[in-house]
Amino acid sequence: MTDKLSFLLDGVEIPFHKGQTIMQAATAAGAYIPHLCFHPDLAPHGSCRLCIVDINGKTVSSCTQPAEDRQEVHSNIPELQQARLRLIQLLFAEGNHFCPSCEVSGNCQLQALAYDLGMTHYHYAPFSAVRAQDASHPELFIDRDRCILCDLCGRASCSSDNKNVYGLSGRGEQTHLIFRSQSGNLADTAASVHDHAAHICPVGCILPKQGNYMQTIGSRLYDNAPIHKVGNHRM
Ligand code: FES
């Protein structure tokens, strides 16, 4: 008898300790569950739903679901991969993700997941959003058209940078990225290009103004292996 706690993820035993979520335990064990709004050092947000898993026929988000001993968890099954593909296609339709001209191309988790899930077309009519950009900051440019509302920057700004620069405001389709300054401009916050929050964006919304397009094709994060093998190292 052992008192070690573990569950099965697609048949692979994953150890965990009490209080860990399925995603936290899987990540710590080196197993990949697709995700966009999860970061191992930050509180879960549970908003992107890419991390859905099946437990006894019930679909739950693994980044918020506590792990339980001897649970059988299924992630890499056709129904869930298809649901994830539709979520990715919705995000592509909702934002302006023109990968060939985006400087994050090759390092973008959204793009990498689209490749991994076999996305070949939009599926949904593009929303063609036009949202206010922010170029006020000397070191950072913000392209709100690419924001996927994951709030990773907001959570990193609070808990890693102790600054509370970034946040989300509005409801439903009006939800948008804000900067906590009186003017609403990023330049009037304490944001710095050296912040954790400035480098945690999983897409191409928060961009440094200097040093762009430095990586050649072939040397970018997802050039040589799919995201389910590489994982998320853009942290
Ligand atoms: Fe779980 Fe986004 S990673 S909902």
Image (cartoon, grey):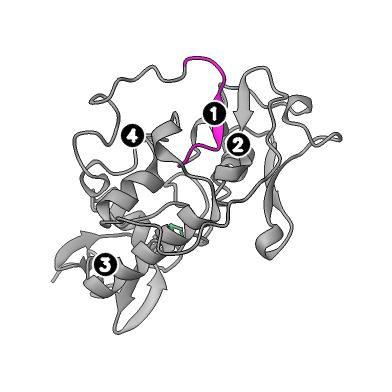
Query: Disc 3 residue type?
Result: Ser
Disc 2 + disc 1, Cβ < 8 Å? yes
Closer to us: mark 3 or mark 2?
Answer: 2
Of label 3 and label 4, which has the lower sequence position? 3
In this orientation, does residue 126 appear?
yes
Asked if the residue at label 3 sits under 8 Å from ligand 1, the reply is no
Cα gap from disc 1 to disc 4, whole angstroms: 14 Å
Q: Element under label 3?
A: loop
Nearer the N terminus, badge 4 or badge 2? 4
| Prevalent SS, magenta region | loop
Question: Residue 197, relative to residue 74: is it above or below?
Answer: above
State the image coordinates of residue 142 (x, y, percent, origin top left): 62, 33
Identify the residue shown where x is 13% and y is 71%. Answer: 1
**Marked residue nearer the N-terminal end (2 or 1):** 2
> Which residue carries the number 1 mark?
207
The segment highlighted magenta reads 202-211
One can see residue 68 in this view:
no
Q: Name the residue under label 4.
A: 106
User: Residue under circle 3?
Assistant: 75
Residue nearer the viewer, 43 or 112: 112
Q: Which of 223 and 5 is in front in this view?
A: 223
Q: Indicate whether residue 131 is drawn in magenta.
A: no
